[in-house]
Amino acid sequence: MENTNELDSGFQIKNLILIESSFSRINNVAFGEGVNNNFNINIEVSVNGQVITVVEEATLIQNFQEIEQVKVKVKMIGIFEYIGDSQLKNLDEFGRVNGAAIIFPYIREHITNISLKAGIGAIILPPVNFTKTEKK
């Protein structure tokens, strides 16, 4: 049996909340050549004592011949708590990298499900390396 104490990260997720979700599409969405997708992620981190709040917003816009065909915006907030000992002492960095990486699969799943319900097929966002995202 594994010793779970060795797996502790020093951080605990307290809550994950969907705070905004919007989706729009035109009647006849085009697929294939000429379709241009623009994907953007914004991350905001705030630290209050031992509590790290991460707001992550993902926006996807699909254009075809300069016509916006699909637009999806999802915003989630993750609340984390520093509860123990961790090699990562910079709480802002934890939020921008680890916190954002924890939240992102939930955003991906939400976008995939909403695109399937919209009848345009599964929009599956690519994985993101949050160690390489820019600080804003």
Image (cartoon, rainbow, N blue to C red):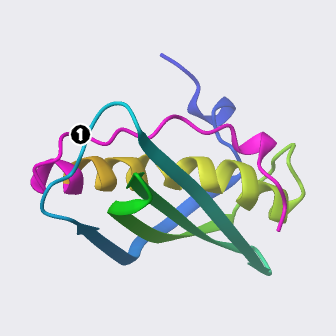
Q: Against 18, is 129 above or below?
A: above
The x and y percentages for residue 17 are 41, 73
Q: Residues within 10 Å of mark 1 (few under 14, many from 20)?
A: some
Q: Residue at coordinates 89% horizontally, 55% vertically from top-left? A: 89
| Residue reaching furthest to the top | 1
Question: Element under label 1?
Answer: loop
Q: Quadrant of residue 24?
A: bottom left
Comparing 38 with 115, the one in front is 38
Please state if 20 lies on the left or on the right of 126 as rendered: left
The x and y percentages for residue 104 are 50, 51
The span shown in magenta is 114-136
Q: Against 129, is 14 above or below?
A: below
The x and y percentages for residue 22 are 32, 74
Please state if 23 lies on the left or on the right of 94 as rendered: left
- For mark 1, what is the residue? 122
Q: Quadrant of residue 8?
A: top right
Quarter occupied by the C terminus: bottom right
Comparing 93 with 22, the one in front is 22
Comparing 87 with 99, the one in front is 99
The kind of secondary structure the magenta stretch mainly shows is loop
Q: Residue at coordinates 75% horizontally, 74% vertically from top-left? A: 50
Q: Residue at coordinates 67% horizontally, 66% vertically from top-left? A: 43
Is residue 33 shown in magenta?
no
Q: How many numbered discs, if any?
A: 1
Please state if 117 lies on the left or on the right of 32 as rendered: left
| Residue reaching furthest to the bottom | 48
Comparing 29 with 56, the one in front is 29
Q: Residue at coordinates 41% horizontally, 38% vertically from top-left? A: 34
Q: Amino acid at mark 1?
A: Ala
